[in-house]
Amino acid sequence: MTTTLLIKALPSNQTLRVVTADTFDEWTRGLSGHEHVPLDGMLFRFPSPALFRGFQTRDMLVPIDLAFICKSGKVRATYLNARPGATTMIEAARMAPTYRYVLETRAGLLAQLRPTSFSGLF
């Protein structure tokens, strides 16, 4: 986790403090082994769209929500309440083929905020 970033969920205008995952090691490790989601979440920032075909929660300890976000900040898809320990793949590339960012938050936060886009991602 390289940096802490403030991003804004729209239309609620709620500011979230997130840690970023910007390297291959950070992307593959993600929140695996964490007993809680750090700050308000983890933002995966990829250099090109849909770099990872999917995400797994196999080594996760807590449930999470995921938002798949395109370069402009628009939310293309969400996956709510992903259960820890699941071995099935969350097929990100199929759900949102142009995603550039993935936001992982504690389960329930995305349903509460209902974001349509985010600002401050880069």
Image: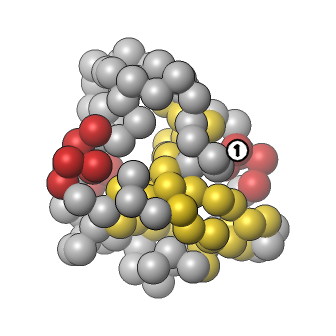
Give x and y (percent) for residue 109: 70, 44
Q: Quadrant of residue 29?
A: top left
Query: Image height check: is 6 above or below 39?
Result: below
- Quadrant in which the C terminus is drawn: bottom left
Q: Residues within 10 Å of mark 1 (few under 14, many from 20)?
A: some
Residue drawn at (47%, 19%) of the image: 61
Q: Residue most toward the bottom?
A: 72
User: Number of callouts in the render?
Assistant: 1
Residue wearing tag 1: 109
Depicted 16 relative to depicted 88: above or below: below
**Residue 5 shows up from this direction:** yes
Q: As drawn, is 21 to the left or to the right of 13?
A: left
Where in the figure is residue 18, as x and y percent of width and height?
57, 57
Q: Please, which colouring scheme is shown?
A: secondary structure
> Label 1 amino acid?
Leu
- Residue 80 location (% of width, % of height): 56, 38
26 or 13: nearer the viewer: 26
Q: Residue at x 69, y 68 (%)?
A: 9
- Mark 1 falls on what kind of element? helix
The answer to whether any part of residue 44 appears in the image is: no
Q: Is residue 65 left or right of residue 26?
A: right
Report the side of 115 relative to 72 (left or right).
Answer: right
Question: Looking at the image, which residue is at 56% across and 48% down?
Answer: 41
| Residue at screen point 23% across, 43% down | 28
Is 59 rendered above or below residue 15? above
The front one of 33 and 47 is: 33
Residue 77 lies, in percent from the top left, at 48, 57
Horizontal arrangement in the rendering, residue 114 relative to residue 80 (left or right): right
Of all residues, the one furthest to the top in this rendering is 85
In the depicted structure, whether residue 80 falls above or below residue 63: below
